């Protein structure tokens, strides 16, 4: 079988990429087109001679951008591989040389020459001033870069890597390149920015001055003053992690270990905060407990006490974050609590342990991975949370908001933002590491292939009563908060004029039917459609990248697989604010100049949410027996056909989980988005935050409520498609494996 | 572009020229005022001239940073709105283009003096005085006297009732700091800031947040530009505006043409239009209560009456310079913000 393919002298994939490379070089606009590549306005505006739109070949022919000329060499070289059989050792050598030379030169010139000529002093010293410049890469450059990359991977495959499997080698190469470009490169760029002085040179002193700043590490709060932001963030995150874990466990116990009758309702309630735009809870808290809040007023009238601003600061942020992130802990823990083998608990009871002893010595220790994961997620989410501290923080500054104001505030200090982001990254990565260390190498596996007919024991009474009280109180609190949100969207002017009205919905979402069709006159439509469009574009791409990566991780073995896995999971541990900052620093300048476009939003969502796709994919793929792949391969299919025809159809639930998750996250994310939106591509969340800043609470809450209902219906439709596979269940599985 | 056309064969020049002539005139506007005002300005200019406006709204600090970053390849044409300091700084760093408009005769003196202190690279489009506003309901509920002067805010009974923005992150708060230094002298000015510090319940990030909190009833007194306070009162919140008795500082909202603008002619058209009475009257439609720089433009009856406010002779040149700014902010950081409250 292999022999027949090896003697073939025409390789469709190779021909495709060689042709693509030439097209990218000869026909497509080399540099980024200002109005966006897809506008196609460039076709009628001076193409192909106008410098702004010309393909590389035309630029060189006109004596411009001559540093692009060497790219012709590898392009011509690639033609030499045509007509050679794969078994010819020259075939592989030619392809590898073509790819490496082409990709290498493309990258080198991209970084070497920017909008101010040479980017490096030593280049200037060597060649003198360039007297020319170049902008961000466009369609032509991107296509050519991909062509070189995949020609290179075909060369590697032809040398026999991964059994000469072109698809797998190309997939690995592709994932490595995009993860390097969109995760490692921006992070590295951000780390560098921490060392830049005002004059633009690099210095460790600058970093030290910004790092050892009292505003960052001060311990004044121990003696009545104010503490540094880093301590504030750390303290808050640990508290939130602990509280959400405890509350999540409480709810999980109620659902699995009690006779509670409305479990489905409880599960539904826990989905709510996941689809709630992040700062809405903060607003509802102000409406309830603020200085003029409903509860505050009631209590002060009742007991004659003076209302205070207790909510603003640590207490408010803590309450809001615990409300928002408890469901995530619940979703993680319910899978784990259910997964604890009843047989083990029954064995303990047979050995005369009472219920309490069983719970404490058997059930609880077996839940350790779940508890650790839940804590970790609460910790990271709290670190990265941006909306709640912004609304409720008062004088309690945390890293995420400080990063934002270091960039946009009057100080405009990117270096400081970078230093703060490093501290934030350090905290989250340490938490990841600590979690792994704590879990150690012990086995927590209790679910095996054998059937387990046992039944979970009920909670011991001493535990059940407080659990029910806490769960009941917290559940009621959540309901009140959401009632408040709905009510707040329908009053005229909160606190001043409480007449009910649909005014805010009308302002946001009014439409006018005219002869020319429907006119979307509401203030919110622009950002609404942009959000839907971006979220819908990001979701399938996230699923594709995530599933291909999962496939590589579960089904293939290759050198450096661990590093590969770490790289693909890294963006999950990086808070959104850090992603936002690093993306502006990295993609504001050539060679990749995409700030202010919709593309940068889509890309940021793909890499933010990809780990969930990866995890969902891994979870499902580990359930599929390898013999399926093998039989497909034995029957003569190649690995691409196997992936598409055998594995993919069996992965439907995982695909849908990844789609729903990334869609919902794209609609509610704010921390990274706030840095990346532009006038043209404004997202719902940043629009809402703008309204909040403008004191326009009615509109903000009405918009958020609408988003909640939109997402509910999306989740509902998805559930109908997948059948009984519940989104919560899916997420708990994927999260548990993080 | 020009460079290229010289190199291309003549027949193609004709083709390219005919294509670019068919293109509509356009203008890229960087706007640093409130969103709805920016939108209205852009749309009205389109209606008045038929020139397509591509508007980006960002705060003045962000816009300054963007113009600086783009200086080798400017993408914007005109920068309209936002407090004067960053405009002056842009002029100082030669990021903006000098232009003497024929509209000068219609403008107030302060607008023109803003231009002359920057070598004609910027001009005043509106001004607003610093002051404070308070929530009348909360003041009454707490049995507090009505404040009328800056020094009133130092009284111990206002402890925990005053809010201002952090001068490190907000231009408004920096103006407050600079005003106190000019009004009372540097030492007494800083003593004032220290006294105020013990009454402050929160230093907000954004300049107008204190009065918005006061409007909602989450704070009693907010130190802000008076037009921001008026806006809250007009929206129906129980806010009263105070022009402090000792006198006060002010800002001059400015406009500049970006150096190397791609659409220079359109930029100048916008510049002249934005100084006309028609354009400046648009402010009233979006509840912007700043004082317009055109003498003939209407002022809202709700707007603070500038003639009754004692304005200090604010030294924009000195206090807008980055060195002085850095020094004052550092002093505030070290001497004021670290004090216990």
Image: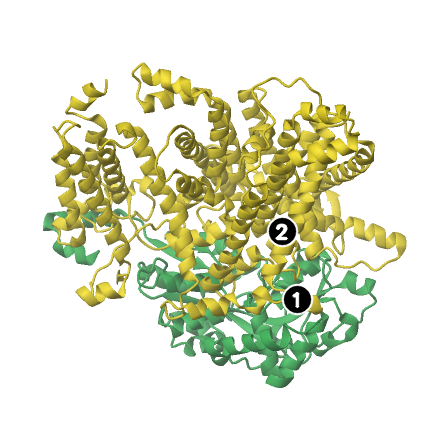
Secondary structure of the residue carrying numbered label 2? helix
The structure residue drawn at horizontal position 14% and vertical position 56%, both measured from the top left corner, is B6
The structure residue drawn at horizontal position 50% and vertical position 75%, both measured from the top left corner, is B326
Mark 2 lies on residue: A237
Is A170 or B30 nearer to us in this picture? A170
Residue A207 sits in quarter = bottom left
Is A672 or A470 nearer to us in this picture? A470
Q: Residue B56's spot in the image, x, y percent? A: 44, 54
Secondary structure of the residue carrying numbered label 1? loop
The reply to whether residue A693 is in sight is yes
Mark 1 vs mark 2: tell me if same chain.
yes
Q: Residue B124's spot in the image, x, y percent? A: 47, 71
Task: Please report contact status of discs 1 and 2: CB closer than 8 Å, yes or no.
Answer: no
**Chain on which label 2 sits:** A
- Residue farthest to the top, as pictured: A635
Mark 1 lies on residue: A226
Q: Residue B205's spot in the image, x, y percent? A: 59, 62
Q: Earlier in the sequence, mark 1 or mark 2?
A: 1
Indicate left or right for B92 with A121 as reference. right
Q: Residue A120's spot in the image, x, y percent? A: 27, 63
**Chain on which label 1 sits:** A
Indicate left or right for A735 with A595 as reference. right
Is A275 or B23 nearer to us in this picture? A275
Few, some or many residues within 10 Å of mark 2 (<14, 14–19, 20+): many
Indicate left or right for A62 with A332 as reference. left
The reply to whether residue A595 is in sight is no
How far separated are the C-alphas under marks 1 and 2?
18 Å
The structure residue drawn at horizontal position 61% and vertical position 76%, both measured from the top left corner, is B307
Is B156 or B84 nearer to us in this picture? B156
- Residue farthest to the right, as pictured: A303
Q: Chain B is drawn in which colour?
A: green
């Amino acid at each position: 079988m292999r022999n027949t393919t090896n003697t073939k002298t025409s390789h469709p994939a190779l021909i495709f990429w060689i042709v693509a490379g030439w097209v990218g070089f000869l026909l497509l606009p080399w540099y980024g087109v200002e109005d966006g590549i897809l506008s196609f306005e460039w076709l009628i505006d001076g193409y192909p001679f106008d410098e702004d739109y010309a393909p590389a070949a035309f630029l060189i022919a006109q004596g411009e951008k001559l540093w692009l000329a060497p790219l012709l060499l590898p392009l011509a070289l690639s033609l030499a591989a045509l007509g050679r059989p794969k078994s010819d050792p020259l075939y592989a050598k030619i392809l590898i040389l073509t790819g490496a030379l082409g990709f290498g030169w493309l990258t080198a010139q991209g970084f070497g020459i920017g909008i101010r000529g040479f980017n490096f002093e030593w280049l200037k010293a060597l060649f003198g001033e360039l007297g020319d410049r170049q902008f961000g890469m466009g369609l032509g450059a991107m296509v050519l870069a991909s062509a070189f990359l995949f020609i290179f991977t075909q060369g590697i495959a032809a040398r026999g890597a991964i059994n000469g499997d072109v698809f797998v080698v190309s997939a690995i190469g592709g994932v490595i390149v995009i993860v390097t470009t969109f995760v490692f490169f921006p992070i590295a760029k951000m780390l560098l920015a921490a060392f830049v002085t005002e004059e633009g040179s690099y210095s460790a002193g600058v970093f030290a001055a910004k790092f050892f700043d009292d505003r960052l590490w001060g311990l004044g709060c121990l003696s009545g003053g104010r503490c540094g932001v880093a301590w504030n963030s750390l303290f808050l995150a640990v508290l939130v992690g602990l509280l959400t874990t405890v509350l999540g466990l409480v709810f999980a116990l109620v659902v699995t270990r009690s006779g509670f009758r409305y479990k489905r309702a409880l599960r539904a309630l826990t989905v709510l905060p996941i689809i709630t735009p992040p700062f809405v809870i903060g607003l509802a808290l102000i409406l309830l407990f603020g200085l003029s809040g409903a509860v505050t007023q009631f209590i002060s009238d009742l007991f004659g006490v003076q209302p205070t601003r207790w909510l603003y600061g640590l207490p408010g942020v803590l309450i809001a974050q615990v409300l928002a992130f408890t469901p995530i802990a619940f979703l993680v823990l319910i899978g784990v609590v259910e997964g604890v083998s009843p047989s083990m608990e029954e064995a303990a009871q047979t050995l005369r342990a009472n219920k309490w002893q069983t719970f404490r010595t058997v059930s609880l220790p077996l839940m350790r991975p779940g508890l650790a994961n839940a804590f970790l997620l609460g910790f990271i989410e709290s670190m990265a949370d941006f909306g709640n501290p912004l609304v409720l923080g008062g004088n309690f500054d945390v890293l995420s908001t400080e990063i934002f104001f270091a960039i946009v505030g009057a100080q405009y200090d990117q270096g400081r933002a970078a230093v703060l982001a490093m501290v934030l990254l350090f905290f989250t990565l340490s938490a990841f590491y600590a979690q792994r260390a704590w879990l150690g190498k012990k086995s927590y596996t209790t679910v095996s292939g054998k059937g387990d007919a046992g039944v979970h024991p009920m909670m011991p009474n001493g535990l059940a009563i407080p659990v029910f009280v806490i769960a009941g109180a917290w559940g009621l609190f959540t309901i009140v908060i959401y009632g408040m949100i709905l009510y707040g969207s329908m009053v005229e002017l909160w606190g001043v004029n409480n007449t009910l009205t649909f005014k805010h919905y009308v302002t946001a979402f009014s439409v006018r039917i005219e002869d020319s069709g429907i006119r979307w006159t509401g203030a919110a439509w622009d950002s609404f459609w942009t959000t839907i469009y971006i979220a819908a574009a990001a979701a399938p791409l996230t699923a594709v990248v995530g599933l291909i990566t999962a496939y590589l991780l579960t089904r293939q073995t290759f050198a450096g697989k661990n590093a590969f896995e770490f790289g693909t999971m890294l963006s999950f541990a990086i808070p959104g604010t850090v992603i936002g900052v690093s993306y502006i620093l990295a993609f504001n300048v050539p060679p990749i100049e995409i700030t202010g476009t919709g593309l940068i939003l889509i890309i940021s969502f793909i890499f933010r949410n990809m780990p969930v796709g990866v995890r969902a994919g891994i979870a499902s793929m580990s359930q599929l027996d390898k013999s399926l792949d093998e039989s497909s391969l034995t029957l003569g299919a190649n690995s691409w056909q196997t992936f598409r025809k055998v594995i993919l159809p069996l992965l439907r639930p995982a695909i849908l989980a990844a789609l729903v998750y990334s869609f919902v996250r794209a609609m509610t994310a704010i921390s990274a988005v706030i840095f990346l939106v532009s006038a043209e591509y404004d997202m719902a969340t940043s629009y809402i935050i703008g309204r909040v800043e403008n004191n326009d609470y009615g509109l903000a809450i009405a918009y958020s409520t609408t988003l909640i209902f939109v997402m509910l219906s999306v989740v509902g439709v998805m559930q109908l498609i997948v059948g009984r596979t519940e989104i919560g269940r899916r997420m708990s599985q994927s999260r548990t494996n993080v | 572009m020009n460079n290229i056309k010289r190199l291309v064969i003549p027949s193609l020049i004709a083709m390219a020229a005919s294509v670019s002539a068919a293109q509509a005139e356009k203008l890229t506007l960087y706007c640093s005022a409130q969103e709805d005002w920016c939108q209205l300005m852009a749309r009205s200019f389109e209606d008045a001239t038929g020139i397509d406006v591509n508007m980006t709204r960002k705060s003045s600090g962000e816009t300054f940073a963007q113009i600086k970053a783009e200086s080798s390849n400017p993408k914007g044409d005109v920068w309209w709105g936002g407090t004067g300091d960053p405009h002056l700084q842009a002029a100082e760093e030669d990021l903006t283009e000098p232009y003497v408009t024929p509209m000068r005769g219609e403008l107030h003196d302060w607008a023109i003096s803003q231009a002359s202190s920057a070598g004609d690279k910027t001009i005043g489009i509106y001004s607003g005085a610093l002051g404070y506003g308070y929530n009348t309901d909360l003041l009454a509920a707490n049995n507090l006297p009505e404040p009328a002067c800056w020094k009133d805010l130092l009284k111990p009974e206002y402890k925990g009732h005053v809010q201002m923005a952090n001068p490190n992150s907000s231009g408004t708060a920096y103006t407050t700091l600079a005003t106190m230094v000019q009004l009372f002298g540097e030492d007494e000015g800083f003593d004032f800031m220290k006294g105020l510090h013990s009454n402050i319940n929160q230093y907000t990030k954004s300049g107008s947040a204190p009065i918005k909190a006061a409007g909602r009833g989450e704070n009693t007194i907010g130190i802000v530009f008076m037009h921001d306070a008026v806006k809250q009162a007009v929206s129906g919140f129980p806010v009263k505006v105070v022009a402090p008795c000792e006198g006060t500082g002010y800002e001059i909202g400015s406009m500049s043409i970006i150096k190397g603008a791609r659409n220079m002619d359109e930029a100048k058209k916008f510049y002249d239009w934005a100084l006309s009475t028609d354009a400046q009257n648009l402010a009233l439609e979006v509840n912007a209560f700043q004082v317009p720089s055109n003498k003939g433009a209407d002022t809202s009856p709700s707007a603070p009456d500038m003639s009754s406010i004692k304005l200090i002779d604010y030294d924009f040149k000195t206090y807008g310079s980055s060195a002085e700014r850095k020094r004052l902010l550092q002093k505030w950081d070290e001497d004021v913000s670290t004090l216990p409250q």
